[in-house]
Amino acid sequence: MLNFSSTNEILIPLIIIIAQIFAVIAPVLISVAFLVYFERKVLALIQLRRGPNVVGPFGLLQSFADALKLLSKENIIPKGSNKVVFLLAPIITMVLSLAGWAVIPFAPGWVISDLNVGIMYLFAVSSLGVYGVIMAGWASNSQYPFLGALRSAAQMVSYEVSIGFIIITVLLCVGSLNLSKIVEAQQTVWFAIPLLPMFIIFFISALAETNRLPFDLPEDESTLVAGFFTEYSSGSFVLFFLAEYASMILMSSMTTILFLGGWLPPFDIFPFNVLPPIFWFTIKIIFILFLFIWVRATFPRYRYDQLMRLGWKVFLPLSLLWVVLTSGFLVLFDKVPL
């Protein structure tokens, strides 16, 4: 005879977890569609053009039309490729870009898994993203994707080191690896003010980490066609495309949590503190995404040697020095968080 009470004990929490996952993933995927539209509109305004304005009111449905067009195409697999790895690469990249959202707190208590080591989980997930890129480059059995994958791997590893030291600097000021605690520690002052150089370096490293201009060397059209996803088409290409933009939003939310006070309002006075916390969190993410697009429209692409020099010879020593300065300051003035 079945024990219905024990079955319910397993089923109900499982249903709740699945519902929470969908409640986070669905808005992220919709946000990706509107981010593409937002990017095209901002680029158009900067370049004195009109941008998408035909499909739907103000061109709002252009991204959905493009997605449908891509998904209706034939999924071509190159003859000499490793088919399993070739098809697995975009899936891994997409899953990893969405997995980071499990620990992101959108507002007080609004988080799927409030891990004590949330920031380490995020760092690990963003580091794993490089595997999907390497798999795509190798499995394509073509020179351009392989070169793009090598560049991407080297770039991500180079800038993750400085990102790691910047995270350590923030952790020294908070005394916790929990993302909600990091936000709560910024109630008096956002970390972007005392740690301004680290905020700037983190933002530039985020550009390199997400392969965005001026660091989009892995997708360099003039030399590598389309980089590691040259051979991809249809649904596989859509997954890579979605993963890139989902990673952009994830890095923007990380920047918001670490330096811009997460869901906290700029001033704890009326009318700022009346608005819901999720509103402030969203506004800050949109601001960081605007900076991503602004940089793309303004700066030329870096040379590869310049990219590596910036990561290893400028950002790494600076972030390491700031860790020493921050810890020294906290010990000297007896400000070490307990």
Image: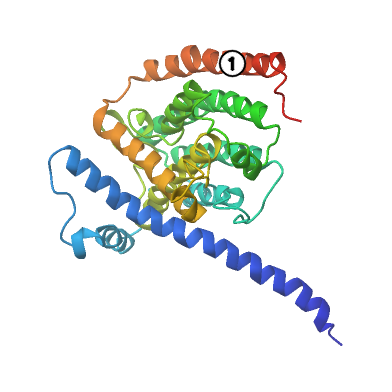
For the residue pair 94 and 147, the one nearer the viewer reads as: 94
Mark 1 highlights which residue? 320
Task: Determine the residue located farthest toward the bottom in the rendered image.
Answer: 1
Determine if residue 155 is in view: yes
Residue ID at (66%, 53%):
113
- Within-10-Å neighbours for mark 1: few <14, some 14–19, many 20+: some
Determine if residue 80 is in view: no
x and y percentages locating residue 109 in the rendered image: 63, 55
Asked if 305 appears above or below 285 in the picture, the reply is above
Asked if 168 appears above or below 101 in the picture, the reply is above
Q: Quadrant of the N terminus?
A: bottom right
x and y percentages locating residue 284 in the rendered image: 43, 43
x and y percentages locating residue 312 in the rendered image: 50, 15
Compared across the picture, whether 334 is left or right of 286 comes to right
Compared across the picture, whether 25 is left or right of 241 comes to right
Q: How is the image coloured?
A: rainbow
Residue ID at (63%, 14%):
324
Residue ID at (72%, 43%):
116
Compared across the picture, whether 2 is left or right of 322 comes to right
Asked if 194 appears above or below 52 in the picture, the reply is above
Q: Picture quarter containing residue 74?
A: bottom left
x and y percentages locating residue 250 in the rendered image: 49, 44
Q: Report helix, strand or loop for mark 1.
A: helix
Q: Amino acid at mark 1?
A: Leu
Q: Picture quarter containing residue 62?
A: bottom left
